[in-house]
């Protein structure tokens, strides 16, 4: 700001360029810790108003200011850029523009809700602010968000990044001078569609319709669980309908209100957790994985191969049959081709990426593998067989990772010659979409092996939690008691549709019955039986017989076309599977009226999940509550608005959760007994998982 | 061109053992244009011919292929050259239209034909124009040149100055009758072309008025400082020294050594000469100071260094750039300059689409 004042005061200066000296980043938003420090909504409102005031000065500057953007231009960074008179961006993959505030449960509070609609039009502004999506530079140019693009340069007189920034600055200076000399006007030609849209937006009736439609859509999607989107719509509406003074005031006030909500605290907590889980706290591995091998070209194996080859990693994909291998290769190709359709890569890049994948039926070249990830059938004897085969051909330094959702790694490693190199890498399906990777270490796994697995996962773009070995590790272990309760609830006569709407109403992105169909009923049965044996009555409640009967009838979920629902190719609507009625009837249990209200049903599901998660921390399966929250939200779809099981306990009080558990314990028994750590937190109210 | 060469050298047609031509944009009807041209020029139908392609260094490839065939003892006399017809490039139907037409030819019943035709949409008719763009990056060459200029911080003025130099030198060379490697050609229905017709020495002020051609509105590469694409053909007779002497000819120059290089087609598309030069010098055991004339392909004004010995008779900027034919012109100019200026070694270098490059050492034949 001091520099800006100097620019305004100095008569010699006629225009200015704003550029970041940090390569790969223009301004990636405001420091969210500053917000976390605010104690009241008034304080947060003041933060917003300070920002508004500074950017207003920029906007009203008589000397043209050009924002030269290279790298992320997000949140406050974009609000800064759109306050300038002109914007020039480098056209590379790192340069993205967006207002992701909504993902943190707040709104763009430095004039964003007021300036964006004027700049890109109301519909596009809503889309940006309500989804928080990143916009690539070329798209931003088309939308009118930036005025000029600069191509990134290759090696020349200086390293490429350095010279590109310099070049951007040179071009920006040229335009700044041109603007000052009035040789260039910041206005741009709008396309026909854009002209029509902006014309339509001048009609109040059309605007009202747009607000209404957007509000309805938001209400439907958020189910009232996320307050930020509606406040964003409100702030935009106020600015357009009542003028900018009212608009800016509304923006700052709503910003203050949102900053104090539990939802924004939960979402910001997740953001912090995610940053932590994108770091390798085990250090740099001695040997970087350059040659990867994946065993099994099924859904998981091919998915793992896909996220590896598209980061430039040479990957061998081995299967036992030509048909199985072909299916897996096709899956990888389709995944890459979908990116071509979205224009994320060119068809040439797709082919070049695809050439990193080598499909084979034998162990050729495994002597060069630095890591082998097996994704074969979930059966201990098969896992033992491939482990021995692999160790016979791989070099001593090669890490053997097992992708399993429930088999204890210690048992898999039992037949290994090099148990220190054996580790668990639990991916989630579909691998190219699900961000989480759960890494499981045994007592014999060395730190370097773990560092190697984490480094690979980070390269694959994953958010990583590292947990101790044990039945079900962390994620599956939390899911199992929840699923047990789901079965119980179904047995008590609550239909899958009702159950789905209750769970999504609580914030789960996927309903509980649908989740079972997605995971696979056979997998759920496997897990329920295995973990049931390991944990006994704490995993009781529902009758596994229900899953067994479903499997017997071939109702395996989405993959077999039938589960709780019927799935048809090409159709998004799903109908209940009426053949389930007889199974429900044969296993029907009387509902307990004292624990069967809608809210009770929601809490029975959630408290069992939370209780198990806290027990995992108590037992040392989990190292930190952050990892517990990230694992639950990114792997299992725990409601993001609650921030994960640990954040939930902190924000909604351990005592209330213990009370719930005690109530259900009295009705159903030991599966609801709260664990010691949760009791400790309830007993000392000052105690929090997050200080 | 082949006929003109024989006419000029008095070599009887039968002596030619083999013919190789380079070309870039292939006409589908004459995909082996070397053979068709040889027949059309009246060569014996017993003389085999093949066509090579390597973008802008296609005729360089024709020459070095000839060198290889002679060195390995397969042939004694090879005709090597290049040809490009930029004024009539094949323009294709769109892929959808092509597919429909191919499917139609396979359709057996009227019903099948009608159902195929019913899928016709107007946009099927929009044609596909060939572009001077990289397949791997979809970037046009001029665009890449502009980025290269920026990466090496070469200003618009420097590029314009270099282009002006090329045109002025070419004009001078033409006026002095130095551009002797030309065969007059009567274009059917038009006038006879007897000299390079793209040499236009302008002024820096005039050139400065042009708008950027590729990176708009602030780029530095313009029509005036880029080579222009023209029709053209070139040919050269390559023999083993023994054969030439035995037949009573005096060779013009030796083709001493050559290299091909390739690099990143995105950011180093046009840097072929930069990589080829030290490599071919090292291979031939020479240094920069041994070289008396430099003949570099000047696709754009970017990356070329104004030197005394450098492209002294103009270059692609002023003489034009018929893709497949440029290589032979470079080598011939180098040989002619060596004779005229009295030097021993010449270095020829060129860049090509795909991020490839070529370097060759030419040595004048002792008088």
Image (cartoon, rainbow, N blue to C red):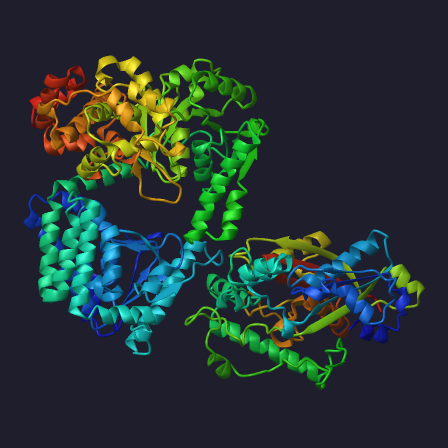
Residue B221 on image: x %, y % = 50, 71
Q: In front: A575, or B350?
A: A575
Is residue A288 positioned above or below A177 on the image?
above
Is B186 left or right of B279, judged from the image as shown? right
Residue A211, x across and y down, in percent:
17, 59
Residue B130 location, quadrant: bottom right
Q: Judge whether A104 appears above or below B300 on screen.
A: above
Quadrant of res A188: bottom left
Residue closer to the observer: B255 or A523? A523
Res A88 visible: no
In front of the other: B274 or A218: A218
Please tell me which residue is depicted at 45% across the width and 68% down the height of the picture. B215
Q: Which residue does the image show at 46% across and 13% down from the upper left?
A: A415
Residue A681 position in % (x across, y down): 11, 24
- In this rendering, the answer to whether A437 lies above or below B88 is above
Q: Where is the N terminus of chain B found, in terms of image quarters?
A: bottom right
Q: Is residue B22 visible?
A: yes
* Spot occupied by residue B204 in the image (x, y as percentages of width and height): 51, 81
- The quadrant of the picture occupied by the C terminus of chain B is bottom right
Q: Nearer the viewer, residue B239 or A310?
A: A310
């Amino acid at each position: 700001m001091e520099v800006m004042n100097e620019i305004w005061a100095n008569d010699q200066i006629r225009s200015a360029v704003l550029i970041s000296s940090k390569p790969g980043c223009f301004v990636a938003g405001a420091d969210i810790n500053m917000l976390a420090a605010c104690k009241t909504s008034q304080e947060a409102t003041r933060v917003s108003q300070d920002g508004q005031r500074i950017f207003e000065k920029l906007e009203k500057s008589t000397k043209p200011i050009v924002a030269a953007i290279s790298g992320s231009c997000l949140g406050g960074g974009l609000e800064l850029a759109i306050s300038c008179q002109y914007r020039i961006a480098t056209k590379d993959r790192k340069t993205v523009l967006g207002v992701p505030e909504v993902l943190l449960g707040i709104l763009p509070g430095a004039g964003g809700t007021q300036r964006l609609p004027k700049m890109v039009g109301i519909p596009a502004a809503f889309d940006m602010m309500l989804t928080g999506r990143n916009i690539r530079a070329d798209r931003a140019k088309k939308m009118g968000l930036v005025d000029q693009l600069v191509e990134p340069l290759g090696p020349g007189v200086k390293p490429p990044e350095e010279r590109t920034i310099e070049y951007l600055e040179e071009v920006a200076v040229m335009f700044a001078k041109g603007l000052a000399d009035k040789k260039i006007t910041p206005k741009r030609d709008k396309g026909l569609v854009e002209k029509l849209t902006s014309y339509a937006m001048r009609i109040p009736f059309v605007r009202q319709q747009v607000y209404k439609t957007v509000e309805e859509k938001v209400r439907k999607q958020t189910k009232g669980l996320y307050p930020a989107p509606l406040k964003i719509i409100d702030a935009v509406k106020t600015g357009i309908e009542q003028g900018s003074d009212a608009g800016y005031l509304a923006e700052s006030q709503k910003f203050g209100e949102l900053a104090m909500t539990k939802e924004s605290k939960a979402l910001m907590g997740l953001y912090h957790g995610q940053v932590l889980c994108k770091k390798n706290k085990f250090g740099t591995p001695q040997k970087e994985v350059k040659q990867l091998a994946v065993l099994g070209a099924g859904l998981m194996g091919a998915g793992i191969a896909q996220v590896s080859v598209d980061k430039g990693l040479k990957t061998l994909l081995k299967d036992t049959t030509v048909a199985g291998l072909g299916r897996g290769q096709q899956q990888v190709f389709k995944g890459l081709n979908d990116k071509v359709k979205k224009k994320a890569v060119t068809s040439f890049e797709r082919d070049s990426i695809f050439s990193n994948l080598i499909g084979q039926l034998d162990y050729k070249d495994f002597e060069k593998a630095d890591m082998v990830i097996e994704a074969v059938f979930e059966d201990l004897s098969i896992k033992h067989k491939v482990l021995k085969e692999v160790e016979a051909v791989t070099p001593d330094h090669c890490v053997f990772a097992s992708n399993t959702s429930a088999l204890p790694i210690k048992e898999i490693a039992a037949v290994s010659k090099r148990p220190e190199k054996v580790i668990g890498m639990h991916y989630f399906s579909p691998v190219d979409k699900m961000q989480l990777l759960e890494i499981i270490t045994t007592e014999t796994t060395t730190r370097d092996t773990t560092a190697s697995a984490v480094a690979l996962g980070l390269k694959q773009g994953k958010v990583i939690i590292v947990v101790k070995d044990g039945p079900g590790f962390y994620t599956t272990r939390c899911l199992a008691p929840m699923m047990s309760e789901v079965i119980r609830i179904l047995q008590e006569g609550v239909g899958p549709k009702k159950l789905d709407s209750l769970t999504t109403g609580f914030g789960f992105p996927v309903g509980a019955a649908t989740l079972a169909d997605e995971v696979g009923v056979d997998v759920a049965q496997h897990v329920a039986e295995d973990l049931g044996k390991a944990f006994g009555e704490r995993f009781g409640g529902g009758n596994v017989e229900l899953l067994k009967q479903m499997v017997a009838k071939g109702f395996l979920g989405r993959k077999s076309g039938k589960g709780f629902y019927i799935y048809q190719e090409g159709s998004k609507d799903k109908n209940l599977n009426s053949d389930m009625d007889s199974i429900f009837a044969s296993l029907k249990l009387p509902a307990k009226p004292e624990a069967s209200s809608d809210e009770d049903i929601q809490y029975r599901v959630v408290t069992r999940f939370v209780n198990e998660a806290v027990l995992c921390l108590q037992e040392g399966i989990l190292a930190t509550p952050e990892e517990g929250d990230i694992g639950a939200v990114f792997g299992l779809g725990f409601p993001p608005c609650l921030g994960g099981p640990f954040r939930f306990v902190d924000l909604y009080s351990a005592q209330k959760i213990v009370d719930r558990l005690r109530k259900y314990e009295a009705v159903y028994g030991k599966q609801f007994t709260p664990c010691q750590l949760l009791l400790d937190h309830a007993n000392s109210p000052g105690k929090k998982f997050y200080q | 061109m082949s006929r003109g060469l024989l006419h000029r050298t008095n070599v009887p047609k039968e002596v030619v053992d083999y013919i190789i031509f380079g070309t870039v944009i292939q006409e589908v009807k004459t995909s082996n244009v070397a053979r068709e041209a040889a027949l059309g020029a009246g060569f014996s139908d017993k003389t085999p011919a093949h066509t090579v392609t390597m973008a802008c260094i296609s005729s360089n490839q024709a020459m070095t292929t000839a060198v290889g065939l002679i060195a390995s003892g397969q042939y004694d006399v090879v005709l090597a050259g290049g040809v490009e017809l930029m004024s009539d490039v094949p323009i294709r139907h769109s892929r959808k239209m092509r597919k429909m037409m191919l499917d139609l030819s396979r359709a057996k019943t009227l019903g099948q034909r009608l159902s195929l035709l019913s899928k016709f949409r107007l946009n099927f008719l929009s044609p596909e124009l060939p572009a001077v763009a990289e397949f791997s990056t979809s970037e046009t060459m001029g665009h890449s040149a502009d980025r290269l200029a920026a990466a090496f911080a070469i200003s618009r003025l420097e590029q314009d100055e270099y282009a002006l130099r090329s045109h002025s030198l070419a004009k001078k060379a033409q006026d002095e009758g130095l551009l002797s490697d030309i065969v007059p050609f009567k274009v059917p229905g038009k006038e006879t072309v007897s000299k390079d017709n793209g040499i236009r020495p302008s002024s820096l002020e005039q050139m400065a008025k042009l708008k950027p051609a590729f990176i708009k509105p602030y780029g530095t590469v313009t029509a005036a400082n880029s080579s222009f694409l023209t029709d053209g053909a070139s040919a050269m007779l390559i023999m083993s020294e023994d054969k030439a002497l035995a037949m009573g000819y005096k060779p013009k120059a030796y083709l001493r050594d050559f290299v091909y290089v390739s690099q990143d087609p995105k950011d180093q598309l046009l840097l072929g000469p930069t990589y080829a030069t030290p490599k071919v010098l090292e291979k031939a055991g020479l240094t920069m100071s041994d070289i008396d004339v430099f003949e570099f392909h000047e696709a754009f004004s970017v990356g070329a260094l104004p030197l005394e010995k450098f492209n002294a008779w103009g270059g692609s900027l002023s003489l034009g750039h018929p893709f497949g034919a440029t290589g032979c012109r470079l080598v011939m100019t180098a040989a002619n300059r060596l004779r005229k200026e009295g030097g021993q070694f010449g270095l020829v270098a060129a860049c090509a689409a795909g991020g490839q490059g070529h370097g060759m050492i030419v040595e004048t034949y002792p008088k």
